[in-house]
Amino acid sequence: MGAEDVRRQQPNVRAMRFLGTEVRPVETGSRTLRDAVNEAMRDWMASVKDTHYILGSAVGPHPFPKIVRDFQSVIGRESIEQSKMRFGRLPDVAIACVGGGSNAAGMFYPFVQTTDVPLIGVEAGGRGPTAGEHAAPLTFGQPGILHGSLSYVLQDEDGQTCDVHSASAGLDYPGVGPEHSYWKDSGRVKYTQCTDDDALQAVLTLARNEGILCALESAHAIHEAMEQAKQRSRDEIVLVCLSGRGDKDAAEVQRLLGMVN
């Protein structure tokens, strides 16, 4: 786990250690997800005879993106079942945040063949469109190889991955799962972005109106859901994937918003 993410996600790290996990902070590079994946794959290559490797996102070499997608797809399947049970029909749009893309792949995959339900993935717009200030490869990236798969990657003219930024530790990755790249090219999923500032305000809006403290990455999808709601009638159904609880991000959100302890 990148050392910067260890700092940002201290409640999760504490819980993992209580449960007996050895957490190794990675101090190289930007000290975030990309660097953690680099180190995990290096370790795996050197110990493959007695080590099992898996990544918690829909990236990396086959079959890992497929494994993660299939397990996560329970989210989309249950959303379809519950929507039919409660509303008698499918939602009018489904929205999820996209970093590596695991939660979005899980939400979208059961809907992919249902072409009358638009799907929207929301990337990390960070501080703006300048290179190094965001983590939006589907918006600004080019096809390239990262961690063993072909997908959209934020890279320089020499093909080296660019630095990225997001207030969310779950989204600051320079690539994205290969299936998301396919869905972008096929036009099945529309990908947009949300800035740090808009995501932080979405955290507060959801908490104060619904009593739900969402993860900072999920807030990117909440912002897009509110933008969609402005354009839709009151009887339309906007489905949002809340990919995690906000307990882990509460201290970081407080710091970024300048709230007094």
Image: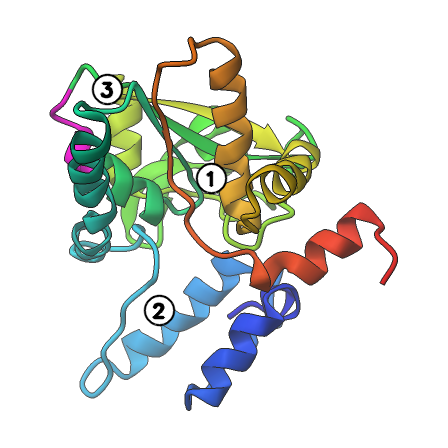
Other residues around mark 2 within 10 Å, as few (<14) / some (14–19) / many (≥20): some
Q: What range of the chain is rendered magenta? A: 109-114
Q: Is residue 22 left or right of residue 134?
A: left
Q: Which mark is residue 41?
A: 2
Q: Is residue 84 above or below residue 61?
A: above
Looking at the image, which residue is at 16% across and 17% down? 115
Residue 59 drawn at (x, y percent): 31, 51
Q: Quadrant of residue 78?
A: top left
Task: Between residue 260 and residue 174, name the one nearer to us.
Answer: 260
Residue 103 drawn at (x, y percent): 34, 47
Q: Of helix, strand and loop, which one carries label 3?
A: loop
Marks 2/3 in contact by CB < 8 Å: the verdict is no
Q: Which residue is mark 3?
A: 117
Query: Could one spot residue 29 in this view of the protein?
Result: no
Give, as a three-letter code, the residue at label 1. Gly
Q: CA distance from mark 1 to mark 3?
A: 36 Å
Looking at the image, which residue is at 42% across and 39% down? 98
Q: Is residue 34 left or right of residue 88?
A: right
Which residue reaches farthest right? 260
Other residues around mark 1 within 10 Å, as few (<14) / some (14–19) / many (≥20): few
Residue 204 falls inside the magenta stretch = no
Q: Is residue 200 above or below residue 113?
A: below
Counting residues from the start of the chain, the first of labels 1 and 3 encountered is 3
Q: Is residue 31 left or right of residue 228?
A: right
Marks 2/1 in contact by CB < 8 Å: the verdict is no
Give, as a three-letter code, the residue at label 2. Met
Residue 11 drawn at (x, y percent): 58, 72
Q: Of helix, strand and loop, which one carries label 2?
A: helix
Q: Is residue 28 left or right of residue 68?
A: right
Q: Which mark is residue 159?
A: 1
Give, as a three-letter code, the residue at label 3. Val
